[in-house]
Amino acid sequence: MKKSLLKNILIFFLVFLAIASIFSLYNLKESEVEPITTQDLIAEINSNEIKKIEVVGSQLNITKTDDSLQSLDKEPSESLSTLLDNLGVEKEKIQQIPIEIKTESGAGYWLSMILPFLLPLLLIVVFIWFMMRQVQGANSKAMSFGQSKVKQAKKDDKNKITFKNVAGVKEAKEELEEIVEFLKYPKKFIALGAKIPKGVLLMGPPGTGKTLLAKAVAGQAGVPFFSISGSEFVEMFVGVGASRVRDLFDKAKKSAPCIVFIDEIDAVGRQRGAGLGGSHDEREQTLNQILVEMDGFEPTANVIVIAATNRPDVLDPALLRPGRFDRRVTLDLPDINDRESILKVHAHKKPLTKEVDLRQVAERTPGFSGADLENLLNESAIFAARQDKKKIDKSDVLESIEKVLLGPQRKSHILSKDEKKVTAVHEAGHALISYILPHADPVHKVSIISRGRAAGYTMNLPERDKYLHKRSEFIDQLAVLLGGYVAEDMTFGEVTTGASNDLQRATQLARKLITQFGMSEKLAPRTYGEKDELVFLGRDIREQRNYSEKVAEEIDSEIDKLINQAVKTAEKTISENRDKIDRLVTDLAKKETIEKDEFLELMEGKANKKTEDK
């Protein structure tokens, strides 16, 4: 409101300056005419210097023989001839001068009389009008405060999103096909006594395509699509959220059949009565209104609410009961086939060279969501454009994978010779143990080039997507994590701070094995500790203990046991394969980056044999 007020004042000021400048130009023109006195006029007439006199009302416009202009004001009631006669001017002199009498127009007279008063009045009226309009705008905003900020998607047949635009998630699309049928042919279901589902809850990690899938349902059914975020309901004032919910559902009922999409519904749908020191009353009122509106739908009101969240565990049970969100659709991270399909969709308008194999890219991106894959190809296009390429080649895509995973190369972060050697030994330790241990993921790349916060990195990627993991896999993974720490200690007799992140990840993994996965050889197969998401005063408070201090000591003892076993496995592996790690360290120091094929040749000794033959 302040910005708008300042804008109006500025406009008013500029208009005022423009009018003032126009009047100043008018006055400048007038200033070219020389005003004279009556005595000057008589003297000029007597000396024959007057060429013409023009009488306009009470003003005399005098033109001299040299074409210069003069002006004189006389009394309105006295004529020019009378004036000159009274002043003793000879009649012969007067008769020699052409005198032209002009009558002033009525409009000009009134304009000259009224304009000096009318113009300031008009400026004041315009200023008051600007102020009144500003106040009316504020009042209208205040009156619309309780209206929902829902956005309705425009009908665009060319850019309409359907299930064809959504790759992967086959089961989710099959589940949502029923919703499309309900929207297209509701009478078929009502005739059999079936109730149209009121709500669909899309659950899944971020970036798995929940919003895209909701748009695809609306596009497939050809119905209006209303979208709003859960956080847009909640305001500082109590009751506004509930009012916006009512307004949203009123608009939806008028446009039925339609779809209402509420993104991040956990912003208002969290369990009621939770938290220390009371709850957010406005949020609870908003949730109550959503529950009432969904219950109030008539059986024939063809409005379906689709909500999305990545935290279904914190939602209020009343939202999840039958009659509210009748369908729950889970979207998982895509597998290798789905990743390939998603890459094909996003690569549709990007010129790729023939050497870019999207299947190979899908193999290198386990755990990537659909949004991650879209970002990957976008980064590839940006990287190719920076190098003025006409097409995206394989090197651009592989570089983008590492950028998304680890961050961009830190070219300014130059390691000293000693630090380079320590980093090479550290990464060689990780890579060697990954190669030797049977249950570790294969090595795809080893590098001592800094990326993100890492001085170097070893890229381990699984051969296939895994949904279940064995204890032996975790034990080998612990040894791989500690391989860099052990390699540094065995080579230099001391360790550096470069292993801090590895130690943190190894500790977290060991704790999960004991407390969550029931993989302890000593403790009972149960979970230890409960996460209470309802308390909001810090992570440590949310993790509540359900075990005694004695069991806590045993948990710490089991974690130490797993870590020590991993250290011994790493030490044994490095000692038995010292020649291989030395070859790897030497090549890393020279080349800085070693790909999978070259790494395998080094481990098998083929690379050295080729060098000797040459």
Image (cartoon, grey):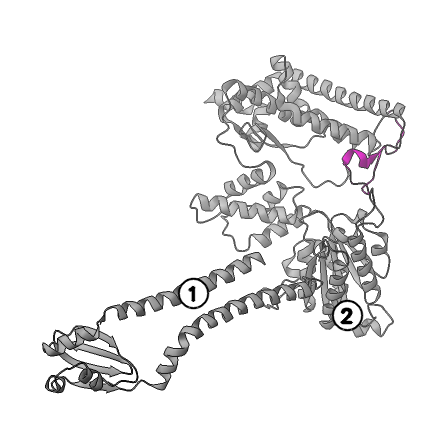
Magenta span includes 63: no
| Mark 2 lies on residue | 302
Tag of residue 237:
none
Q: What residue type is labelled 2?
A: Asn
Camera-side residue: 128 or 575? 128
Quadrant for residue 252, please give it: bottom right
Q: Give me the C-alpha separation between circle 2 and circle 1.
A: 58 Å
> Residue at left 68%, top 32%?
441
Q: Which of marks 2 and 1 is in front?
A: 1
Magenta part of the chain: 522-545
Measuring from the top left, give residue 308's x and y in whole percent: 73, 54
Q: Which amino acid does label 1 sit on?
A: Phe
Magenta stretch encompasses residue 523: yes
Q: What element carries label 2?
A: loop
Question: Along the horizontal axis of the image, is 21 left or right of 182?
Answer: left
Q: Mark 1 points at which residue?
A: 16
Give how far across and how far down residue 21 sits, in percent.
Answer: 35, 65
Q: Is mark 1 on a helix, strand or loop?
A: helix
